[in-house]
Amino acid sequence: MSNTESKTYWRSLEDLSRNEAYKDYINREFPEGAGELSDGYSRRNFLQIMGASVALAGLAACRKPVQKLLPYHKQPENVVAGIPLYYASALPFQDYGVGVVVTTNEGRPTKIEGNEDHPGSRGATNVFQQASILDLYDVNRSRAVRHNGEESSWNDFVAFCSSHFADRNKNIAFISEANGSPTYNRLKAEILGRFPNARWATYEPFGAANQLAGSEITFGSKLRPHYHFDKADVVISLDFDFLNIAPNDVENSMSYADRRRVQSTSDEMNRLYIVEPGLSQTGSNADHRLRIKAGDMAAFTAALASRLSSGVSGLEAFSGVNNEFSQHSWVSVLAQELLSNRGNSILAAGNSYSPEVHATVAAINAAVGNAGSTVEYLNVPFLDDSYNPDSLRNVARDVRNGTIDTLIIVGGNPVYNAPADLEFATVMQQASTTIHLASHIDETSKLAQWHVNRAHFLEFWGDAHSYTGELSVIQPVIRPLFGGKSEIEFLAAILHGENHEGYDLVRESWRNVLTSEFDNSWNEVVHDGIYRQTRFSSGNTGLSSGFNSSMRSWLTSVQGSSSSDIELIFKADNRIYDGRYANNGWLQEFPDPVTKITWDNVAAMSPAMAASIGVRERSFGETTYDLVTITSGGTELTMPAWIVPGHADNSITVTVGYGRQNIGASADDIGHNSYILRTYDNQLAVPSVTVARNGRSYPIACTQNHHQMEDRPLVREATLEEYRAKPDFAPAMVYTPGRRPEDGKPKNLFNDQMFPPHQPQWGMAIDLNACTGCGVCTIACQAENNIPVIGKREVERNREMHWIRVDRYFQGDKENPKVVHQPIPCMHCEQAPCELVCPVAATTHSDDGLNQMTYNQCIGTRYCSNNCPYKVRRFNFFNYAKNWLEIDEDPDIIQMAMNPDVSVRFRGVMEKCTYCVQRINRAKIARKNETGNSIKPVDGAVKTACQQACPSQAITFGDITDQESVISRTKSNERNYLLIEELNIRPRTSYLGKLRNPNTELV
Amino acid sequence: MSSNSGYVEEAPLVKGNHTFSSITALVADIVEKPTPFWWYIAFGISNLLLGLLFAMLGYLIWEGTGVWGLNNTVAWGWAIINFVWWVGIGHAGTLISAVLFLFRQGWRTAINRFAEAMTIFAVMCAGIFPAVHVGRIWVIYWVFPLPNQMQMWPNFNSPLLWDVFAVSTYFTVSLLFWYVGLIPDLATLRDRVKNKLAAKIYGIFALGWTGGNRQWQHYEKSYMILAGIATPLVLSVHTIVSFDFAVSIIPGWHTTIFPPYFVAGAIFSGFAMVMTLMIIARKIYGLEDIMTIDHIEKMNIIILVTGWMVGFAYIMEFFIAWYSGVEYEKFAFVNRAIGPYAWAYWIMMSCNVIAPNFFWFKKMRRSIPVSFVLSIVVNIGMWFERFVITVTSLAQDFLPGSWAYYSPTWVDVLTYVGTFGLFFSNFLLFLRFLPMIAIAEVKMVMPQADPHYYDEDGNEPKKSDQINEPNIKA
């Protein structure tokens, strides 16, 4: 990658011919919200349609347009057309980075996978990481530096910096996102050193500030907890969604699942307790789940600490605490578990809970010996005072007081997501100079005098600490598409008043890290994507001297919430987090792991709560839901109500990030902005709101319409005890009426297909005990297989295009349901019912056992889909790919995200999971090249996209004819079963039965 | 003849003491007289609906199948329902003309031309749907086994492919049968019409028919052969249509009772449609002497019988679902009766199983208004039968996680409405330009055509209006 300055990335030749239109476009302040994602028709083309109806001669227009490619005239170095290149990099998220490997095809990054050498990834990813490739190709990203709303340039900005910041005594305030980059933090320190009157606030709407403040109370310094779930027999989560959107979730899922991947009856398994108000994805996996209001969590934690204080030392501050949870059965059970699993248990609380709750949790972990064994408290060098919970409020106060003249916002979007009572929009107007670095012209940028367009992490040089401190270099894999700048280049311009390249800045930082043979070591780090020697050290987990007194003073105020008050809880969204991914179509259309809602946020509440305010439960087929108005402090928020079984009563959970305007095609006018009720003191939850049904209803696109299994043996589960008593509980659950055991396997009426012995036979197994239902398989598949985004309206019509979906069922009573997740890809049945009924033989079986779909031959009768018992086939009802890939005036951009090995499907054809046939064939070709005759790739050479991304490694895939392969061994597990086996369609995808590890005292 | 002999004479098939020439005049005058004003209005409306159909199809083909209410789970909806419904209606024609012909049911002559025309137009309406419901209509010819350089060949295991052949064969044979039956009457019109151009056109299609002995001999043989060919088709078409469902593995579709049940249902709805049209036509054109109340009664009996066959199938499906012990099957059927689509199921049951029971009563059987209303009710019921089968089975199949509710869009509805435009435009043209009653065949069942015209005592038979209605005492 050369580091020369370039304004925009190269474009297609077509740009030459339409340059005027293009310039016109980039000069417009706000990209047009392309509201036509979904509906394939509009008034605009109505006349065309009517014309066509008169003369069907227009049929010729339906033909697929033919475009011809030309090969390289001269072969570029290191590029073989059709062979992707892979680069290690790191994906920064808040104050840590995760190692990734980026696939690029002819210079276009097309896929992100986890870096197996990186401890925060181990080869896996989460949904945000998978979807971040699409953010690169977001056409609505800001394309220029802007000054007072007019297009400006980076050079102008640098010139402005050199004059404006020449005065070292300027009163500057910085507001930044959490950032774990060594270079960034070096520049931050230099800036704070250069400008003595500068102050810095780090603000994340869902950051770790409270947790850090808690550890400061307990241990005297800001320590970051690193959980070793693989070492814990008992995990107790206090509303800590560690499998999903909590920090370091990929590693968490991986190590948690390590203790669920039971191979035989002698294996042990961990036990997960969760106490939470709403039903989180982690909560849906719990062996035991207690629903309490968020407002009760402090009292619950205190009661737990109090109960423990008699058994262990270090919790004396809590002795004698008596509140409404002191006699709760869960308190005694959890205390018992912690005491009998000293050093082998984990207690953790959700980041938004108060510092004192975190302090208590940390003290308990220290007291029962978990600190240092299962919970490692790490010294993180860059967690300075700017990470204090009140830093943002102090900056806002200073600006209001007029003591700040220049407000610099490094990423983040405080006008949108800062606590509402800070009234950040007016704060912005009170500073005389405001500068904002942002990827989009967002709410904050619109009010800032200077807007600097930010580059995507695939476009810049940078570096990042992993969650546990290992370093990675972020290397760009493409030149900035829109000339964006990284935050380190931005800070360097402020610091030095001149342009510094990110490459130089990063290398300068690394000269302190790699002290010998810099160039060689640098190349090695950049290549590997990881430098392990910088792991954070463990902090001192001795109780601080002030701990007891601060806890005692806190405990006097701790009480449970009034049970009749309705609390409103704010959560980061499972799909768009705090709103930062709002313009990501994949994530907007990704079904929430718990509710299965797409394209919206909802007010989640329990069935009883819903009944009390007159919200009606929707019957099958209804797609509109009651709107409720939530009022707090005179501010009203109107949102659709959504009934979530297992939610705490008198409690409402809303997620944030929605209700955007003029951000981009996928973000605009989607959902409702719940930040307007989130105030400084109530960032976790507003303790008392009023809520009423407002009489109107609202359409919601939910991908699952029925939530019970109807007593069908779909997800087969047993307790660990039952499994040990009957290891084959899962396959034994098949019921075929009239068949006796001696009849053996069902017979086939037709001749079985002969699979040639020289071919591998592909099969997949999904361990439902490891699967946590996070849904990253869905997004990984979407990224790998060029699956289009179809929009809310089409999803509402149940036409979602995902090739692998995750079914989620509730069992048991509505108040405390058991939840199961089941990923459903194409099963590649050997006796595939879809193949029989296609009149044109467009879906057939391959010699290596794949049920293949020949798009070119498909005429679209949809008979195959009807006859598929798993309903995994997806039909292009409209020209989804075209609508998606030409979403904007600038279609070349998003088209760059497409995987060249996978056909983009045309209107009117069926599609479905292929077991990633492009990866299979690549491996078969490679194997043939290596051996000369074998086309059986070695075990593990083929990983499907879903398998590769899965952070709990629930999916195994491989050649079932190879008895030594992982898949063969997995399928020989006693828990292995086939879904709807009695149809005798012989699916190649099987499941491993789910296990639960309940505590007999709570059953 | 003594009055207490107990011999009950058959009611005459043609009433009103018609002679051969008056019959000819009665039917042929309709074609020869100036076009009545109402016809223009009816034709205009039908054409508007036909235009609507083309508009909807154009819109569909331009935009994609997504303009319909289909989804991932329910991938067949109104299009397939309408297809099966129209094909079912198209059953009566061939049944009446071929099967009843082979069984020597003379009463068929009053309605066979009419019913055959209806058949052809109904099959045309039906044929639209399998064609346009595919995603890529521009390559639909791939369903035909046409040798090609792409080495593509249809999948002969697929019931949809059988459908293509079954329906197209049925249409071809029905058309041929209809046309062969028309030849003598076309010749009659050729000889009667004043307009030279019309005479020319009728003449071309009459194929030089002169009514000669030898021509009649050939004609009757070929008619018999065609009837023989058409008869198995009556059974095969709807059998194969039912295979579209029965061959699949979806609970509620995967049912061996489907072939006979579908055929019975098709006859049921076909007769009902003939009844609807006939009651209007005989009134407007004053054909009560030929399409007599006795005809209506006979047809009502067939509707009653086939209605109960269908009803039996409905009940049998439930029994088998329970008896099989298959959970999914049980669920599918219980869910039809009490699930989210129960309204459709109970419309079907009321219209198809309960409503025809009025025909147990002779008074009802011979009541024109009752027959008319019930004939429409039956066809509503039969449409819902196909809806229940197609949609409820798909919407809630094996995995509850993929269940999805189906509801149609305005395009679905208007396309269906538009097919009536196609049907009635054709039918009105038929009424206007072709003899709607098989003149020659009706004459064959009149007493005058009987070589034993005189009774055993050498008397002329009674005039038809002298014979009392059959009065069979129980």
Image (cartoon, coloured by chain):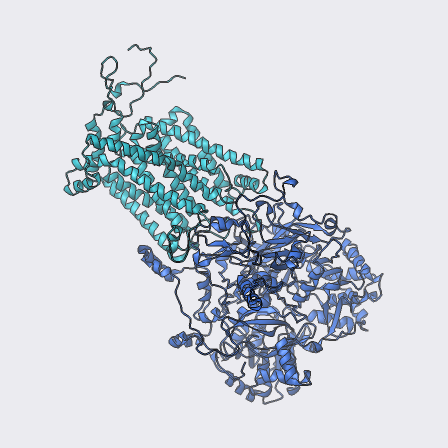
Chain colours: A blue, B cyan
**Residue A208 sits in quarter:** bottom right
Q: Is residue A865 above or below residue A888?
A: above
**Residue B208 sits in quarter:** top left
Which of the pair A43/A869 is nearer the observer? A869
Q: Is residue A580 visible?
A: no
- In the image, taking residue B456 as reference, residue A950 lies left or right, namely right
Position of residue A329 measured from the top left corner of the image (x, y, whole percent): 77, 53
Position of residue B136 measured from the top left corner of the image (x, y, whole percent): 40, 55
Q: Is residue A621 above or below residue A676?
A: above
Quadrant of the rendering where the N terminus of chain A is positioned: bottom right
**Residue A68 sits in quarter:** bottom left
Position of residue A338 measured from the top left corner of the image (x, y, whole percent): 79, 60
- In the image, taking residue A230 as reference, residue A482 lies left or right, namely left
Which of the pair A726/A986 is nearer the observer? A986
Q: Is residue A269 visible?
A: yes
Which of the pair A735/A74 is nearer the observer? A74
Q: Is residue B271 above or below residue A247?
A: above
